[in-house]
Image: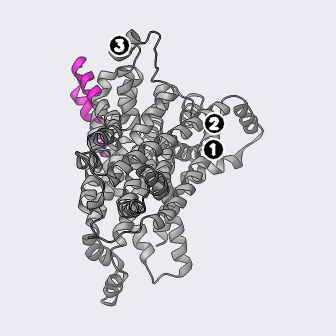
Amino acid sequence: MYLIGLIALLIALPLFGIVSAWFSLDVNGLQVLAQQMQTVMPGYLATSAWLAFAVTLGVIIVGAGTAVAISLFEFRGKRFLSWALLLPMAMPAYVSAYAFTDFLQYGAPLQTSLRAIFPGFRFDVRSLSGAIFLFVFTLYPYAYLLARNALSERGAHLMEAARLLGTPLGERIRKVALPLARPALMAGAALALMETLADYGVSAYFGLTTFTTGIYKAWMVMDDRIAAAQYATVLLLFVALLLWVERREQQRMRFATVRGHRGDGAESRLPRLGRSGTTLAWLVCGLPVVLGFILPVLILLHLIWRDPVALDLTRYVSWTWNSFRFGGSAAVIAVLLALALCFAQRANDLPRIRRLMLRFVARLASMGYAIPGSVIAVGILLPLAWLQALMPGSMIGIWLTATSAGVVYAYLVRFTAVAVQSVEAGYSRIPASFDEAARTMGSSRWHIVRRLHMPLLWRSLATAALMVFVDVVKELPATLLLRPFNTDTLAVIAHNLARDERLAEAAVPALTIVAVGLIPVLLVTRALNRKA
């Protein structure tokens, strides 16, 4: 049990590394901080604040509109749209940025045609407004999915009650449906906002001055680890606040998602839309799917067809192998660690203080998912720099930065929480009496896990491994900062090629990332269809 707690603390170590950087500030560090506050920090704050506000508002609007249409009305094509609305979850925002940059550039056919109609028209997608557009239509599924679940469970019953009282349709949506879905919408918007703040690919490609790009420039360009730690700490405070809001809204969702009685005909009372209503519903639900998934995929395919490149199969296989190697290693280790943490918290024979400590370190290790990859990378590199200064002959720095160990460690810090959540959900369905019965028959803890828990948890373990694998394949900032020399992944090579304006070459690895990201979307869709 002590070993499990030690490993969990090791997973949380980068967070302590970021915070501890402030305790080592000297006079020069304070001067750097004052200089940053006068020069670049206001720009980082302003850009990040505008991005956060606009993306939150857009995700709430799109998520609410699609959830209301799918959950509270019947119309032709509803079943298709209900799962198609989840497809943008498979599209990383930076991949969508590469696609729309080619589609919406000044000399592209679309802008050329619009200028023929509206002289002087010009839209630069590589701007703050373009980034907001991309984030809204790739991240709205977070709000849509949670709001849809909230409305599907009680929305139809309450909307029917309001209809019987003579309330008009618009008033029913405004005064019944939206307040019911508000906690879910806020929780989904908080998740989308954390993804926005953690993004590096879109901000770097569009040249935006956000905290994530500031961290990368401070460390890799200016070689200023103090400035990097300062930016990372400010971003960490943002994320901590968002985590608090998300947890609060999740708790409120418990009161808003009490299930109604099955079999009372609630589904049959959903109003069926006519021709104009169906057209409006398809516009509300179909436009996000087109802009968030279908159009970027078609643009990438068109790039490959328009500018065919001689793909170096050997190098492409190497990039794919690196992505799958990192993803597979992180998935296996994260699942084993999650299994150990969750099992340790079930042990009733431990002293209360030890159980509380294990629960605390487990929650601490689970915070990494909300932390941007660039912040985690700085949290790993800072202690290494101090260790090398104290122990000049130490090989641990080389071991972590010149091999795959460092980047896999960063993935574990970032994505262990994903595995823990899935395994905890599986353990919640295994009664504690099973463990007690096995212990009375003389079974050891290892025997209980191997012979009892793992056969019952195999679905949860497989889901956890798959989710971690997909997240690792899509991860960009941590990989950029920590990957070994001459070790590129699909995400890194797509970013590098797009940065060099070689979009046709970047389309192949980008589409591969999207194809891998479709796997969890299909699993979520299958699970939702089972519930329905």
- The disc at residue 113 is 3
Q: Which residue is the site of mark 2?
A: 45
**Residue placed at 27% from the left, 53% from the top?**
525
From this viewpoint, which residue is outermost toward the bottom? 440
Q: Does residue 81 appear left or right of residue 128 in this picture?
A: left
> Where residue 307 sits: x, y (%)?
25, 17
| Residue 478 x %, y % | 46, 41
Q: Is residue 302 magenta?
A: yes
Q: Which residue is mark 1?
A: 234
- State the SS at label 1: helix
Which residue does the image show at 54% across and 44% down from the upper left?
375
**Residue placed most toward the observer, 4 or 339:** 339
The image position of residue 457, as x and y in percent, is 29, 68
Q: Quadrant of residue 274?
A: top left
Sooner in the amino-acid sequence: mark 2 or mark 3 = 2
Asked whether disc 1 touches disc 2, contact meaning CB atoms under 8 Å apart, the reply is yes
**Percent from the top left, x then y, of residue 280?**
33, 39
Residue range highlighted in magenta: 298-325
In primary-sequence order, the first of circles 3 and 1 is 3
Q: Could you give the CA–CA distance between mark 3 and mark 1, rounded to whole angstroms?
A: 44 Å
Q: Identify which residue is drawn at 65% across, 41% down.
A: 230
Q: How many marks?
A: 3
Q: Secondary structure at mark 3?
A: helix
Q: Nearer the viewer, mark 2 or mark 3?
A: 3
